[in-house]
Image (cartoon, helix red, strand yellow):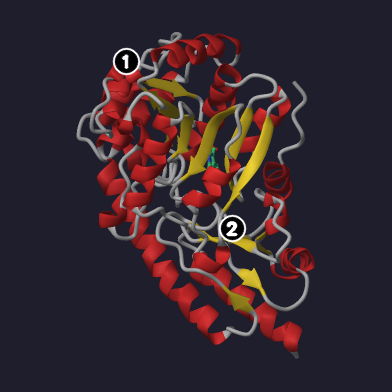
């Protein structure tokens, strides 16, 4: 299997730990272990007594129970825990797909959502989000992409990088369509529970039936990327067992301290999500204000969920803009080319506390550039 370099991850490898302001992060503001443990009275003592032997390969029973409780109809045995969401994507694809399968992928997308399928020898095609319509996905477009050898549809809702959230009726129809056509629906839901209006929250795909696989993680909405705990939930036993047996060749089992902390985080996830949504909503007011003052330079569709948006630079080339900005102002924006976007977009992160200072620097850079 030949995997191409992961453009976005290579880009972050170059800048993430040496740039003052990350204005394009996909995750929310994190916290220390001390802050996380403070969420429950006796958690510090329990954490100190955490046994450091191997853990159960599927994920600890108590963590899987906590994760199953995030959905409406799942049981702990429907949940499989990984070292982050990316491992789960990789192993799902290795278990579910074969050479020459046709796979339809919500586009633009986080690269691994198509790259692993490509490396397996699948034919992937783009279900292109329509920018002119708020980055929406059109079900007729999907239907026109179906082939005899189509095996799976991959979606990411809420969406990285646009913050798009599908209307409920469309998501119901998408699930019906996958079921009726015997297709797998892989639903990357790592930004779930970060909807700005909770009424917009979609049901998890796993709750629609065994055609679906839901992906979750502690990294994004809950701001705990360093735990490296992600999971899949599916009622498809055959697929579940295949994925579980592949894990023996990657991480075997997860980090015991991380599983402990992830369980604690998920039990308290409403508080974590509320904290991070407060940061995002405050940051959005600053961004709205910036974009209204610079409407000839930027355009965008305001996200409905999640910790990022995908604005467009209206003057000049976005790669040179991002490159010059990071060099001169120490502010990192992610050019859309990392998503193979050719229309001058860039990714803007909304989940970090220092966004106001980063925007101040950005604005200073823009005014200097003009003068
Ligand atoms: C849509 C999407 N899926 C999966 C992942 C992988 O998550 P993790 O880094 O926690 O493995 C990311 C990370 O940016 C993502 O944005």
Residue at disc 1, CB closer than 8 Å to ligand 1: no
Q: Residue at x 63, y 45 (%)?
A: 126
Rendered view: 284 above or below 122: below
Which residue does the numbered mark 1 point to in the structure image?
Answer: 77
* Residue 214 appearing in the image: no
Kindly state the secondary structure of the residue where label 2 is placed.
loop
Rendered view: 113 above or below 140: above
Kindly state the secondary structure of the residue where label 1 is placed.
helix
Q: Residue at x 62, y 74 (%)?
A: 361
* Residue 77 appearing in the image: yes
**In x, y percent, where is residue 41?**
20, 34
Residue density around tag 1, few if under 14, some if 14–19, many if 20 or more, within 10 Å: some
Sequence-earlier tag: 2 or 1: 2
Q: Residue at x 46, y 32 (%)?
A: 185
Residue density around tag 2, few if under 14, some if 14–19, many if 20 or more, within 10 Å: many
Which picture quadrant has residue 59? top left
Rendered view: 239 above or below 270: above
Quick check: 101 left or right of 240? right
* C-alpha distance separating marks 2 and 1: 36 Å
* Residue 105 - label: none
- Front residue (pair 228, 307): 307
- Front residue (pair 274, 241): 241
**In x, y percent, where is residue 152?**
54, 30
Q: Quadrant of the C terminus?
A: bottom right
**In x, y percent, where is residue 146?**
57, 37
- Front residue (pair 191, 252): 191
| 2 vs 1, front mark | 1
Furthest toward the bottom, the residue is 371
Residues tagged 2 and 1 counted as in contact (Cβ below 8 A): no
- Front residue (pair 66, 43): 66
Which residue does the numbered mark 2 point to in the structure image?
Answer: 24
Quick check: 243 left or right of 267? right
């Amino acid at each position: 299997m030949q995997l191409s370099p992961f453009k976005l991850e290579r880009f972050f490898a170059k800048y993430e730990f040496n740039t003052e302001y990350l204005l394009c992060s996909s995750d929310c503001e994190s916290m220390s272990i001390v802050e996380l443990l403070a969420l429950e009275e006796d958690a510090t003592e329990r954490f100190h007594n955490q046994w450091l032997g191997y853990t159960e390969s599927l994920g600890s029973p108590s963590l899987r129970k906590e994760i199953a409780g995030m959905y409406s109809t799942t049981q702990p045995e429907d949940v499989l825990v990984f070292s982050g969401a990316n491992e789960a994507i990789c192993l799902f694809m290795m278990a579910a797909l074969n050479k020459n399968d046709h796979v339809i992928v919500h586009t633009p997308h986080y690269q691994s959502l198509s790259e692993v399928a490509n490396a397996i020898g699948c034919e992937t095609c783009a279900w292109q989000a329509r920018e002119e319509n708020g980055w929406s996905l059109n079900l007729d477009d999907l239907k026109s992409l179906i082939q005899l050898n189509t095996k799976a549809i991959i979606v990411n809702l809420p969406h990285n990088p646009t913050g798009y959230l599908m209307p409920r009726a469309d998501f119901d129809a998408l699930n019906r369509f996958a079921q009726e056509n015997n297709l797998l629906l892989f639903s990357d839901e790592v930004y779930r529970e970060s909807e700005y209006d909770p009424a917009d929250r979609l049901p998890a795909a796993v709750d629609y039936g065994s055609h679906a696989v839901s992906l979750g993680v502690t990294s994004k909405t809950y701001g705990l990327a360093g735990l490296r705990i992600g999971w899949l939930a599916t009622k498809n036993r055959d697929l579940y067992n295949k994925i579980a047996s592949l894990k023996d060749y990657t991480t075997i089992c997860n980090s015991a301290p991380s599983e402990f902390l992830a369980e604690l985080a998920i039990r308290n996830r409403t508080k974590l999500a509320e904290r991070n949504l407060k940061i995002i909503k405050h940051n959005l007011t600053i961004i709205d204000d910036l974009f209204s003052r610079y409407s000839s330079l930027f355009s965008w569709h305001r996200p409905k969920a999640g910790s990022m948006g995908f604005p467009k630079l209206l003057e000049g080339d976005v790669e040179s803009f991002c490159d010059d900005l990071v060099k001169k102002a120490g502010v990192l924006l992610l050019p859309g080319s990392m998503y193979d976007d050719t229309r001058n977009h860039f990714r803007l992160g909304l989940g970090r506390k220092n966004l106001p200072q980063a925007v101040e620097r950005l604005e200073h850079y823009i005014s200097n550039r003009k003068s």
